[in-house]
Every structure is written in structure tokens, then in C-alpha cells.
Image (cartoon, rainbow, N blue to C red):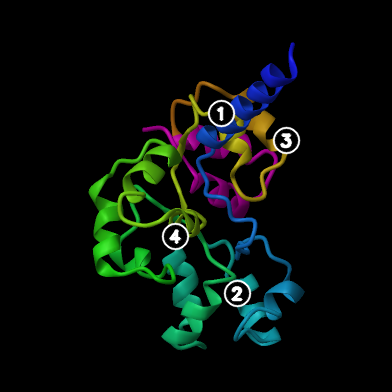
Amino acid sequence: MTKISKALAVVICLLAGSAMAQVGNNDTLADPNLIEPEALAALPHMTESLAETVVDNRPYLTAQALDDVLAESLDRDQRNELYGSLFRQINLNNASEEEMLLIPGMNGRMAHEFEEYRPYTSLDQFRREIGKYVDDDELARFERYVFIPMNLNSASEDDFATIPGMTSRMVHEFEEYRPYSSMEQFRREIGKYVDEDEVARLESYVTLD
């Protein structure tokens, strides 16, 4: 294989990997379900006491659930600043407008555009449609805050691996019990490996639709 062919193959692989991702790249956005208490307490407007409260109320299955807890101690502007560092990603296919507006920099018009193109089947679709309204940097920023639920029976190994906190062992277990006939089956099988809270957290990223 020539150097050019090898380079092309690498590019194709990278593009394919990007297309398969169903959870926005949140490497710079802490997950409230996974962040360590010490790191959480160091974020804007957080205290050790509030960090403890946040940890005690895990898991957060929606951004609204997190906001409800934080609203007891922080005002809207403080929460908005915090959400530049910490957020529970929203499900693009069922998040309410109120939940979408928790994303920093979001406005009613853009929330409408997010809803307009439902149902989303891939992040590529999200990029294509929302990219009509914002530049690449803003699109990438928005993408950090969203995910598209993946089908338990058809999602790829790479899709599952994008779930925050996912391990290769758990990816294997997700695939091991296919085909799933119900979410109850998913809870029963995955519940062999993790507790109820973790099953609920993982379930929030998947679907059988």
C-alpha cells in the first residue's frame, strides 16, 4: 500500500468513527454522574457542601434533574456559568424546550431548530441540520451538550463506547444479550453487573425504538 493510500485509509477510518458516535464529544465537559467530588467542588460556584449534595442525588437521568438540585443553591446566572464546565447531556429526541434552554448560549429560536429536525438518527444528521444556522465552532460547542439514544439491537460497539463511563467489558455485556425484546430484559441482564442506579444511567442512553 502506498503512503497516500495508507493516509487515505486512516482518514476514512477517522471519519467512520466520527459518524458512528451517538454521544457528543464531552472531553472538556464534566459529567455530573461520574466526576469525582473533589473535582466537582473545584468548579465555578461549587462548594464542598454543594458537591456532596450533587453526589448524593445521583444518578441524573436528565439535565433538568441536575438543574433542579443546583437551583436550590445557585441562581440562574451561576448555573449557566457552571454549565460551561459541567452538564448532563440532553437527549436530542425527547428533551423539552426548557431543558434545551439550560445549554449555555441557547435561545428560543435555536431550541426550535433543535426540535424541528426530530427524530435524529445520527450526530451527522444533527451536524448537517444545525450547521445551517451556526458556524463550525458553535456547532461543535452545541454537540458537547447532546446525545442521540442508540438502539440496543443495532448499535455498533463503537456507538456503545461513546456512552460516558462505558468500559469495554460493559460494551461486551450490552452485545452479549442481543436481541433484546424489552427494556425490562435489558435491566435484568445488565443488572447482573451494576447496581440499579447505574442501570438507570446506562438505560437513559439507549432505546429499542
Residue type beneath disc 1: Ala
Measure the alpha-carbon separation of dots 4 and 2: 28 Å
Label 1: which residue? Answer: 16
User: Comparing marks 3 and 2, which lies closer to the viewer?
Assistant: 3
Classify the position of the C terminus by image quarter. Answer: top left
Give the quadrant of residue 10: top right
In this view, 11 is above or below 38? above
> In the rendered structure, which disc, 1 or 4, sits on the residue that comes first in sequence?
1
Measure the alpha-carbon separation of dots 2 and 1: 36 Å
Residue type beneath disc 3: Ser
Disc 1, SS: helix
> In the rendered structure, which disc, 1 or 3, sits on the residue that comes first in sequence?
1
Q: Are marks 2 and 1 in contact (CB under 8 Å)?
A: no
What residue appears at the point 74 percent right and 14 percent down from the top-left corner?
2
Measure the alpha-carbon separation of dots 1 and 4: 22 Å
x and y, in percent, of residue 154 in the image: 48, 24
Label 4: which residue? Answer: 138
x and y, in percent, of residue 118 in the image: 28, 44
Disc 3, SS: helix
Measure the alpha-carbon separation of dots 3 and 4: 31 Å
User: Comparing marks 4 and 2, which lies closer to the viewer?
Assistant: 4
Q: Decide whether residue 37 is among the magenta residues.
A: no
Front-most of residues 199 and 115: 115
Front-most of residues 137 and 123: 137
Q: Which residues are magenta?
A: 183-209
Residue type beneath disc 4: Glu
